[in-house]
Amino acid sequence: GLVLGGKIAEVLDDDEKEDFGKKIQDSLESNPDNTSSKWTSKKNKNLNAEILPTNSYKIDNQTCRDFEKIEEESTACRDEQGNWKVI
Protein backbone atom coordinates (compact mmCIF):
# COMPACT_ATOMS: atom_id res chain seq x y z
CA GLY A 1 0.00 0.00 0.00
CA LEU A 2 0.83 3.65 -0.18
CA VAL A 3 2.16 5.55 2.81
CA LEU A 4 0.02 8.67 3.12
CA GLY A 5 1.34 11.92 4.47
CA GLY A 6 0.12 15.46 4.65
CA LYS A 7 -2.75 17.36 6.15
CA ILE A 8 -5.57 15.22 4.78
CA ALA A 9 -4.08 12.03 6.26
CA GLU A 10 -4.35 13.58 9.72
CA VAL A 11 -8.18 13.75 9.54
CA LEU A 12 -8.96 10.44 7.82
CA ASP A 13 -9.86 7.22 9.60
CA ASP A 14 -8.21 3.96 8.52
CA ASP A 15 -10.89 3.07 5.94
CA GLU A 16 -10.67 6.53 4.36
CA LYS A 17 -6.86 6.39 4.32
CA GLU A 18 -7.02 3.07 2.49
CA ASP A 19 -9.58 4.41 -0.01
CA PHE A 20 -7.60 7.63 -0.57
CA GLY A 21 -4.38 5.62 -0.97
CA LYS A 22 -6.05 3.44 -3.62
CA LYS A 23 -7.15 6.56 -5.51
CA ILE A 24 -3.57 7.89 -5.48
CA GLN A 25 -2.29 4.48 -6.65
CA ASP A 26 -4.88 4.39 -9.45
CA SER A 27 -3.99 7.95 -10.51
CA LEU A 28 -0.25 7.20 -10.58
CA GLU A 29 -0.86 3.98 -12.48
CA SER A 30 -3.40 5.18 -15.04
CA ASN A 31 -3.43 8.95 -15.44
CA PRO A 32 -1.25 10.62 -18.05
CA ASP A 33 0.83 13.56 -16.78
CA ASN A 34 -1.31 16.60 -15.98
CA THR A 35 -4.58 14.60 -15.88
CA SER A 36 -6.20 14.72 -12.43
CA SER A 37 -8.50 12.43 -10.49
CA LYS A 38 -10.87 13.49 -7.74
CA TRP A 39 -11.32 11.61 -4.47
CA THR A 40 -14.27 12.19 -2.15
CA SER A 41 -14.68 10.61 1.27
CA LYS A 42 -17.60 8.17 1.47
CA LYS A 43 -18.16 9.28 5.08
CA ASN A 44 -17.86 13.05 4.68
CA LYS A 45 -18.83 14.39 1.24
CA ASN A 46 -17.21 17.74 2.11
CA LEU A 47 -13.80 16.06 2.40
CA ASN A 48 -12.20 15.63 -1.00
CA ALA A 49 -8.89 15.87 -2.79
CA GLU A 50 -7.55 16.14 -6.28
CA ILE A 51 -4.60 13.99 -7.34
CA LEU A 52 -2.59 15.31 -10.28
CA PRO A 53 0.39 13.34 -11.63
CA THR A 54 2.66 15.98 -13.16
CA ASN A 55 5.90 14.33 -14.29
CA SER A 56 7.21 10.80 -15.01
CA TYR A 57 10.90 9.88 -14.89
CA LYS A 58 13.48 7.31 -13.71
CA ILE A 59 15.76 7.44 -10.64
CA ASP A 60 18.27 4.58 -10.41
CA ASN A 61 16.09 2.36 -12.64
CA GLN A 62 12.97 3.12 -10.54
CA THR A 63 9.97 4.64 -12.28
CA CYS A 64 8.92 7.80 -10.42
CA ARG A 65 6.15 10.35 -10.78
CA ASP A 66 5.72 13.76 -9.21
CA PHE A 67 2.16 14.46 -8.17
CA GLU A 68 0.10 17.05 -6.37
CA LYS A 69 -2.63 16.33 -3.83
CA ILE A 70 -4.67 18.99 -2.12
CA GLU A 71 -2.23 21.93 -1.97
CA GLU A 72 0.87 19.80 -1.50
CA GLU A 73 3.32 18.56 -4.09
CA SER A 74 4.73 15.06 -3.59
CA THR A 75 6.86 12.45 -5.37
CA ALA A 76 6.32 8.70 -5.50
CA CYS A 77 8.64 5.97 -6.75
CA ARG A 78 7.97 2.31 -7.45
CA ASP A 79 9.45 -0.15 -4.98
CA GLU A 80 10.82 -3.59 -5.84
CA GLN A 81 7.28 -5.05 -5.89
CA GLY A 82 6.03 -2.33 -8.25
CA ASN A 83 4.01 -0.43 -5.61
CA TRP A 84 4.09 3.38 -5.56
CA LYS A 85 5.70 4.80 -2.39
CA VAL A 86 5.67 8.49 -1.45
CA ILE A 87 9.23 9.72 -0.88
Image: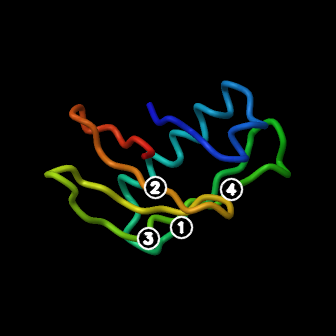
Marks 3, 4: nearer the viewer: 3
3D distance between C-alphas at marks 1 and 2: 7 Å
Q: CA distance from mark 4 to mark 2?
A: 12 Å
Cβ–Cβ under 8 Å for marks 3 and 2: no
Residue drawn at (25%, 38%) of the image: 82
Marks 3 and 4: CB-CB under 8 Å? no
Residue at which label 1 appears: 36
Distance of mark 3 from mark 4, alpha carbons?
Answer: 16 Å
Give above or below for 38 relative to 18. Answer: below
Q: How busy is the neighbourhood of tag 1: few (under 14 within 10 Å), some, or many (20 plus)?
A: some
Q: Earlier in the sequence, mark 1 or mark 2?
A: 2
Question: Disc 1 and disc 3: Cα gap in Å?
Answer: 9 Å
Kindly identify the residue that appears in the image at 51 percent across and 40 percent down: 22
Q: Nearer the viewer, mark 1 or mark 3?
A: 3
Residue occupying image coordinates x 80% and y 49%: 47
Label 1 – label 4 distance at C-alpha: 10 Å
Q: Which residue is mark 2?
A: 27
The residue singled out by tag 3 in the image is: 54
Report the Cα–Cα distance between label 3 and label 2.
11 Å
Front residue (pair 8, 42) = 8
Give whichever of discs 3 and 4 has the lower sequence position.
Answer: 4
